[in-house]
Structure formats: C-alpha cells, structure tokens
Image: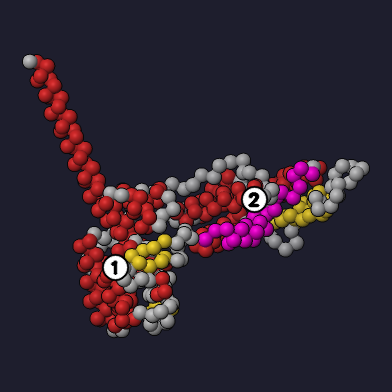
Amino acid sequence: MAVKKHPCIPGAWQIDWYEPNTSKPVNTKTGNHPLRRRFETYVGTYEDATSRWAELAQIHKSTKRANVNPRLNDAIPDFLAHIELNKSKGYYNSWVYALDKIKPTFGPHPVSNITLKMTEDFKRLHREIPRMCNLCLQYLKILISWMVTHGKAQPLPFKIVLLPHVEKIPQPPSPSEFELILKTIRENFKKSGTTEEQRAIQEAIVQTIYTTGIRFNECRQLQWQHLRWDDGRCLVAVTKTGTQRFCILPPEALELLKPYKQKTGYIFTNPATAKPYTTIRRLLINAAHKHNIPLRGPHDLRHAAGTDTLEATGDIRATQDMLGHTTLKSTQRYTKIATKRQQRIAEQTALFRKQEREAEASRKKNAKK
C-alpha cells in the first residue's frame, strides 16, 4: 500500500491498497478471502490522504467491511437505474437535475470522505438559491441512505443541516382578477396575429387549469380519446405522482375546443408545431402585469383552483382529491391562503367569545339574586 501523487489529476493522490475479494472462496488456512489490488483517487492534502490510507488498512485486515466504500460517482448509475424502475418519470428527472449539482462536490469521494466542512462549502456555493440547495442536500442524504442499505457505505457520523428557507406563500388571483387577466389575454390575441385555432386552444388551457387545478404539464398531455363530451370528464393519464385521476373540463373550454376535436392524440396541440404547447407562462404574465397582479405562471391558476375550492366547500379532503396531492400535508398549504375561510373562523370565534361573556354575566346576575 502507498500514497503517491496522481499521474493525471493535479492536486490529487493515488492510494494503492488491497481489499478482500469476497467473490472468491475463503482461504482455508487463513480464514480470510484472497486479496485484490485497488487504486483510489483522493482529492485533498497529503496528510488527509495518509489518514484515508490508514482507514483502508483496516479494510485490508478485515473481511467484514469488504468493498463497502465506492465513490458516489461509482454508485450513482445503479441508484439512478433503481429510481427509473421504481419511481415516476418526474422524480427521476428531478434526480438527474440535482445530481448535476451534487457530483462536482461529492461525486469523487466515498461516503467516508464526506465531511461536515464539505456540506458547509456546498451550502455557501449555492446559498443564493436555498430551495435548490436544500433539495440537493436532501437527495444526497437519500443517496447515502441507499448506499448504506445496499452495503456500499457506512452512515455519516454527522447530521446534514439544511439552509434556512422561508417558503413563499402563493398569491393566486381572485375571481375578478382572473376575469381581468382573461380579458387582457383576448385583447393581446387580436394584436399578436395568432390564428383563431391557436387562440381557442390557448384560452382553453387557461380555463382548464383555472377550473380543474391540474398542473400545466398534466394539462398539456390530456388526450382526445380520454375526453367525454357529455359531461367533460377527462382522464389525467400522465401525472406528477404517477397516480391517474379524472378532471372535469369546464363548458367554456369544451366550447372552444369543439371545432377542433379529434378522435385521438393530444388535445392542447399547437397548430404551428403539431405538438403540445410547452409553455403559456409569458401569455399569462403579460396580461397579469398590465393590472399589477402578481401572477408568476400557470401554477398560480392551480393555486387559485385549490384556494377557491377550499373557500367554497371547507372540505380539505375534496380539495386534495381535485389537486391530486398524495398527502394532506401538501393541501394544508392552501389553508394559509384561504383568507375568506380564515375570516369565517375568526367570526365564529368572536361569536363564541361573545356568547361566553353573556353567559358568564347571566350566571353572575342570577347568583346575586
């Protein structure tokens, strides 16, 4: 075993060591597995590389910890294959995005080399985008947990602390604000020179998301063969959670789509490209900003659908079903922005207190008699 400067990577060290080869039978004389030669790349100081060499020396002496310390980059392909097979496409894509950020810092190291300082440096590097940074750190913990479960690593000896992050509360448009936005969209259509079919389909998308609360990516992949014209029911076959559900397209959207209906294929297809629309964000933002409405994109229309449903019914479980949330925890966010619901609760509380005061005064009056 030895620690030498890496022949190709500046500032790195090459550790030459031997590990027990568990793929071969145990030597009957020594009681151990035969050894096989390994090379490990270590980025850091010579002293740290020597310390790592000492750790590997313990593996050399024991068969109990054989081959449990691959680099994260070596474990990631197997882990991604596991995610692709067992999770949704959206979750897999989220992992691919996060790993692009995780690999440069943590990828070249085995789990045993990951230090608290490395996680702190990662947070400093990405502190301007705390939500993304925390997502990556959460995924790093999941990856390490998977490696531990599969005998590829030992658990971290410290806890990964996330960046402080205050989740912004959505500000969905009110019904009157939505009518202003829709009116402005129609006016902008006339100025833009888009065809009548393009106008109808884009407005139908806006009406559908606002009424049903489905995500834009779910909306754009709705298909004609799944739509029932008698009641507007449509199967949402491609969802974020992987669980299919139904939505009810509003009459306004059905009326707009009727002249262009097909037997099969995507409903919200851009006539210019023959493919589903990829975004309507700019369409909405241009109309909203004209009236100083803080709309950020089509997802705010989904928030509006969830908020208004909760305001109108007070039924959080029904709101959860409509939005396609897997847990109530996600739906409970809407209780924070359901202001009319909060007003009703405040009024009921005030009425209760008034009745209690009157009852207490009545008891005291009767006691004096």
Which residue is most to the front? 230
Instruction: Find numbered disc 1 in the image and state the secondary structure of the residue it sits on.
Output: loop
Q: Is residue 88 left or right of residue 150?
A: left
Asked if 359 appears above or below 54 in the picture, the reply is: above
Residue 100 in view (yes/no): no
Quarter where residue 32 is shown: top right
Which residue is most to the right? 29
Which quarter of the rendered picture does the C terminus lie within? top left
**Residue 298, x across and y down, in percent:** 34, 65
Q: Residue at x 37, y 57 (%)?
A: 323
Q: Residue at x 85, y 49 (%)?
A: 25
Q: Is residue 254 left or right of residue 138?
A: left
What residue range appears in magenta? 63-88
Question: Which residue matches tag 2?
Answer: 147
Asked if 281 appears above or below 336 in the picture, the reply is: below
**Residue 126, x across and y down, in percent:** 49, 55
Question: Which residue matches tag 1?
Answer: 250
